[in-house]
Amino acid sequence: MTYKEEFIRFMADSGVLTFGDFTLKSGRKAPYFINAGNYKTGAQLAKLGSFYAECIKESGIEADTLFGPAYKGIPLAVSAATALYNKFGIDVSYCFDRKEVKDHGEGGMFVGQKLSDGDKVVIIEDVMTSGKALREVLPKLRGEADVNITGMIITVDRMEKALDSEQSAVQNAYTEFGVRVFSIVTMEDIIKAIEDGVIEGKEYLEAMRAYRAQYGAAY
C-alpha cells in the first residue's frame, strides 16, 4: 500500500474515520465523520507523526521549524518533528503558542524554538474546517518575527465548499493568506480507498459521491 492508503486504514482502525449519518457543525448531513480526538495512545501518535513526515518529504516542503497551534497542534508538531528525524534524518525545531502571554520566567507567547526573521515555518494541524485557526495564528507568528510560512499540513482535505464561498477552506487559505495547505489525504483518496477495498464501506460509496457532488469544491 502507499502511505496514503496506509493512513486511511489507520484512520479507520483508530475510529477516527467513521461512516453513517452525521450532522456536521455546518449543518450539512454527511455520510462520514472525522474525529481526530480518537487518537489517544503513544503508538497512534508515533504513527500519525510518521504520516505527517511522509507528506512533508513527498511535497518537498522546506522547514526550519514546525509550529503546532495550541492545544491540538502541540503533540502533532512534536510527533512530526520526531518522525522527520527518525525516518529521514531531517532535524527541525518545533514550537507552539500559549493561549495567554506569560509575564514571568522566560515570558513570551511561544514555547520551544525562538523564531527569527527568515525562518521557514510549517504549521501542523489536524483538520481545517473554516480557516479560523490559521487566521488566529498568523498574526502571532508574524508578530514574533518576519517568518516565511512555507506551508500548512493537515490530515484530510474534505474538498468541500466553505459556507460562504465556492472555494474550500484549503483553497481559501491560499487565496486569503498566501499559505499553501498540504493534506496527507483528500476526500477523493478516501473514496478511492473504499472502491479499491483498502477499507470497508462500499455501502456508503453512493452517499459519499452524492455528498461530494453537492458540496464539493472544484479542484
Image (cartoon, rainbow, N blue to C red):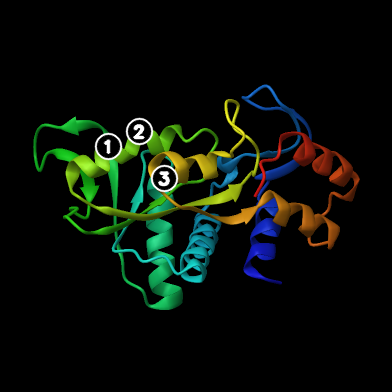
Question: CA–CA distance between discs 2 and 3?
Answer: 13 Å
Q: Which amino acid does label 1 sit on?
A: Pro
Instruction: Tell me: 147 left or right of 89.
Output: left
Can residue 174 be seen in this snapshot?
A: yes
Q: Which amino acid does label 2 sit on?
A: Glu
SS class, disc 3:
helix
Number of labels in the image equals 3
Instruction: Please identify the quarter of the rendering in which residue 199 is found.
Output: bottom right
Question: CA–CA distance between discs 3 and 1?
Answer: 17 Å
Q: Of the numbered discs in the image, which one, if any, rests on residue 73?
A: 3
Instruction: Tell me: 105 left or right of 136.
Output: left
Label 2, on which residue? Answer: 136
Percent from the top left, x then y, of residue 189? 71, 57
Q: Of the numbered discs in the image, which one, if any, rests on residue 139?
A: 1
Is 7 rendered above or below residue 21? below
Dot 1 and dot 2 residues touching (CB under 8 Å):
yes
Crowd class of label 2 (few under 14; some 14 to 19; many from 20; radius 10 Å) = few
Percent from the top left, x then y, of residue 98? 27, 36
Identify the residue shown where x is 19% and y is 32%.
Answer: 101
Dot 3 and dot 1 residues touching (CB under 8 Å):
no
